Image (tube, rainbow, N blue to C red):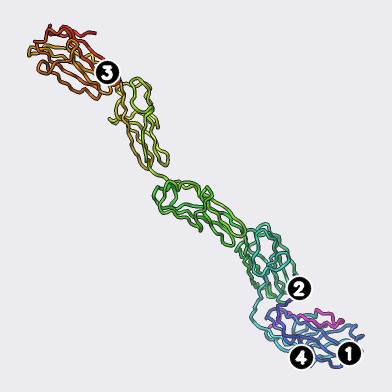
Amino acid sequence: MKVAKKFAVFYCLFRVALCIDSFSITLPQSVDAVGGLCVFVPCTFTIEARFDTDLQGDPKGIWRKDGTTEDQTVFDSTTPKDNKIKGNITGDLRMKDCTTIFNSVNKADSGRYYFRIESGELKYTYRTASVYINVSDSLSVPKPTLSLYRDQMEVQDRRVLEGSSVSLFCSAFPLCPTVLPTLSWSPLPTNIRQEQNQNTSFTSSQLNFITTHLHHELRFNCTATYQLENNDIKTTQSSLVLRVLYGPKNTSVSVSPSGPVMLGSSVILNCSSDGNPAVNYTWYRENGEQIETGPSLTINKTEDTHSGLYYCRAQNQHGAQNSSVQLDIQYAARNTSVSASPSGPVMLGSSVTLNCSSDGNPAVNYTWYRENGEQIETGPSLTINKTDDTHSGLYYCRAQNQHGAQNSSVQLDIQYAPQISLSFHCNSSSKGGIMCVCEVHGRPVPKLEWRLSGQPVPPPENSSVREESVGHTGLRSFIYIHQSLADTPTLQCISANSLGSTSQLFYAVATHHCSPAG
């Protein structure tokens, strides 16, 4: 890489004097300097060939200010302590190099300067060319030059791919050869190699590193610090902002509002990612279906079908990255139902299982109740291993989660053939006849019939029959027999339903009391 050599002093266009008898000198037309600092004056000259031998003796250089007479001498290289302007000739006079540094100049030193060479017979003042030294009180410190390189080529737009090997090059120039700058960097990240170079022409510093996304939009500052001859400190700074191109990183998805999403509510999924250039976003369901583009996905009214995994893909020309979120649509228990297994009527003494099902999110809990409110079981199933007639009735299942509850019920019908209760009897009636009672239970509720001597009871004018229900499964029948029928030897109570029949005999009706037959 080429670095132009510059000086802190600013030279006007060089003026080359015309040769007079082969004597000539090359000087800048003017030099700008700052009070308190040195001033650098580049200078070369020629002489007539006949003086070449004299020049190889012990030459001295003389500078005269604002004129060419001896009393205007301000600098003599052979009497440094007596000079009005301190300094030294850094060039080699024998090589016709009269380059000079004047130290700690002040504003009074401003003026036009002429050079004179003396050595043996050689004594010559160059009157046709001079340099004007302009000393000012204020110091304008030039900023350092800051450049970015990749593969030894300067990157003008400051854009580099992540993973590139790059160099930051900073250079600054001395205010004068005795005031060299020191260079410092900020920030100075880890894993960066620094190289420094310093000479009288310029000072440089180079940072070598591999770019990462962490360097994107990082401002690198190069600071040049000058310690002046009067011990004052001057600083100046240049900055460069690095633009790193990289694929998506740190991709994430969030849900708003956070927490469980209720059925029928609105929800927004937001995707964020870090990439340069800016990433594009695409939304997918877990089955790969593309459903939306952009950083946000809004569902205005959620349904249970919206539950599931959602993917956000962040992508630019340098790569892609996915992130996902599980959307959990929650709702209270619904569609609650109860079934019996086996279905249909349940025979007395058999086993039956009641099953409860419900749809809810989160999963519901089940509780079983009898119709009187008694809690009898928890869990989705209720099993009765051996049924009896007390198990008939209404059974409730309550399905419940933290969002609500729903009930469902089933009627359990325990069926059995008729059974005549032991409470049957006959008593004499105050009216002179006989009153007999027969009570029967069965499911379905049985029918009951009275027979006298094997024959159906005669019409009501000879007897009176009255029936009443007993609970959900029983029937009680009363029969009144007139005295004129007392010669009938037997009375029979017969009961039947779809599952069977049974009967009970009553003897010796005429004796005004009953003797049931076993």
Front tag of 2 and 3: 3
Q: Residue at x 70, y 72 (%)?
A: 172
- Label 4 crowd (10 A; few <14 / some 14-19 / many >=20): some
- Label 2: few (<14), some (14–19) or many (≥20) C-alpha neighbours in 10 Å: some
Task: Give the percent coordinates (x, y) of residue 179.
Answer: 72, 74
Which residue range is magenta in the image?
90-106
- Judge depth for marks 4 and 1 and give the one in front: 1
Q: CA distance from mark 2 to mark 3?
A: 126 Å
The quarter of the displayed image where residue 148 is located: bottom right
Category of crowding for the residue at label 1, using alpha-carbon neighbours closer than 10 angstroms: few (below 14), some (14–19), many (at least 20): few
Is 348 in front, or is 321? 348
Of labels 2 and 1, earlier in sequence is 1
Measure the C-alpha gap from mark 4 to mark 1.
Answer: 25 Å
Q: Are marks 2 and 3 in contact (CB under 8 Å)?
A: no
Q: Which residue is mark 2?
A: 200
- Residue type, numbered disc 1: Glu
| Residue 462 falls in image quadrant | top left
Between the residue at mark 1 and the residue at mark 3, the CA separation in whole angstroms equals: 156 Å
Mark 3: few, some, or many residues within 10 Å (few <14, many ≥20)?
many
Seen from the viewer's position, the closer of residues 233 and 316 is: 316
Circles 3 and 4, Cβ within 8 Å, touching? The answer is no
Mark 4 → mark 2, Cα distance in angstroms: 31 Å
Q: Note whether 405 is above or below 23 in the view shown.
A: above
Q: Secondary structure at mark 3?
A: strand
3D distance between C-alphas at marks 2 and 1: 33 Å
Which of the two marks, 3 or 4, is nearer to us in this view?
Answer: 3
Tell which tag, 4 or 2, sits nearer the viewer: 2
Q: Quadrant of residue 208?
A: bottom right
Report the residue marked by disc 4. Answer: 72
**Percent position (x, y) of residue 482?**
9, 13
Classify 372 as above or below 123: above
